Image: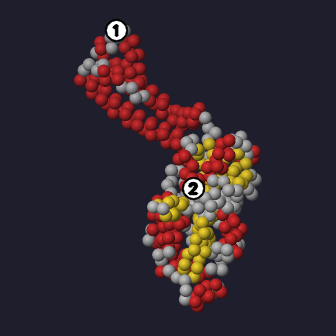
Amino acid sequence: MILSDIDKKGERSGEKEVIKVFVITGPKTNGVVTYENEVNGQKVYSGIAWDTLEAAKKHPDLKKYKFEYTFSEPTFTNYSETVDWVSTGKYDLGLATYSQTKERESKINYTVPVFLDAFALYHYSNKSEFDTLSYILSKIGFQFLILIILGIITGIVLFFVDPQRSIATKVKSRKAFMIRSITTGIATFFGEAGFLFENSSSIKGVIAITLVMLVSVLFLQIMQAEITSLYIEHQMINNISESDIKTKSALGHEGHASGNNWESGNNWEESGKNVTRFKGKTNSELLEIYKNNPNKYLGVLISYYNGLPLIELHPGLTVSVFGNTPECMVYNSRKDKFGEDLNKALLHIRATKESQKICASYIKNPHPNAPPSCTI
């Protein structure tokens, strides 16, 4: 390993080498940043990148470094600006999670990945309840037909097996009793079994309705589970059409990699999809701009886990997820030995599963297409 002049100077002096760290802080609605809290009058920091570095600092190879921190304002969101600062030596380490782009790689070095994120657009669904109902019926309409047929068969069976039911139901006409039996059978398979049980008048009838109830409960449970699954699936479908993309702009943060040459190969802007970028806005503020201008903007373009807290705060908000991308810290390319030591420490906490525990404590995966964040 060839050491840089800075690394050699640190080794000759025998003193701890100072590592200047720039920490991107923000509100918890900004997802994967460092959060500042006050406990007993003391400032306490937490977050994926912060906790990961704190765990890595316990490794013997990092004991020879002294870390000096500079914290951003909570509204700071320009990751590309911090890359420039790290590349010039103003800071040695960018403590946040950075997506990889060709432009950034020409300026700084990346650590090994901390976790996996994805390219994502947060937006409100343009589907109506009628659209959802139509979608569900198109998928399981034939199952409703099966329930009706089973109900009719049940009614006919009851008509012949338990004819004394006509007395309990006070129906004198055989035709009326047949119709009553069929409607009772159909109602049973749609969850209303009151008439089925109330009017039984013989042992054979009790046996028959018990078997009918077993079958109907089984079918109803399957139907309910499938309807729930289809509803969730329909709400999660990426409903951003090509016509929307051509006519509307997405909202984004200035200095973010989202939509700009992602590792996964998704390049929003090069594909002709416009992004209107804002400086010094939180995720919630971008979302408010979008909500106030739904006909002008397509949604908020940020990383999946950066925007995930918005889902819980804003009912009805959905997310379209695109290609996965590894998230790393960045360090000055002249700090080769420090970068090597930091990567050793990060790989160590990965091997001991500590990094996965840190990741899992901050990140949940409610979306069926969410990136496998904590698998690294």
Alpha carbon distance from label 1 to label 2: 73 Å
Question: Where does residue 223 sit, x and y in percent of width and height?
Answer: 45, 36
Nearest to the observer: residue 267 or residue 200? 267
Judge the density around disc 2: few (<14), some (14-19), many (≥20) Cα neighbours within 10 Å: some
Q: Quadrant of residue 103?
A: bottom right
Question: Contact, CB < 8 Å: mark 1 with mark 2?
Answer: no
Q: Residue furthest top?
A: 172
For the point 50% across and 80% down, the residue is 63
Given the current orientation, which residue lies at the most extreme bottom position?
12
**Residue depth check, mark 1 versus mark 2: number of the one nearer the observer:** 2
Q: In terms of secondary structure, where does tag 2 sit?
A: loop
Q: Position of residue 138 (x, y in %)?
A: 56, 35
- Identify which amino acid the numbered label 1 is placed on: Lys
- Residue 90 in the figure: left or right of residue 26: right
Q: Residues within 10 Å of mark 1 (few under 14, many from 20)?
A: few
- How far from the left and from the top, in percent, is residue 262? 66, 61
Q: Which residue is mark 1?
A: 172
Q: Is residue 250 visible?
A: yes
Which quadrant of the figure contains the N terminus? bottom right
Instruction: Say the numbered circle drawn on residue 27.
Output: 2
The residue located at (54%, 78%) in the rendering is 66
Residue 22 higher or lower than 63, as above or below: above
Q: Nearer the viewer, residue 83 or 129?
A: 83
Query: Which amino acid lies under the numbered mark 2 shown in the image of this protein?
Result: Pro
Residue at image location 30% in from the left, 29% down from the top: 210
Which quarter of the figure has residue 83? Answer: bottom right
Q: Which mark is residue 112?
A: none
Q: Disc 1 or 2, which lies upstream in sequence?
A: 2
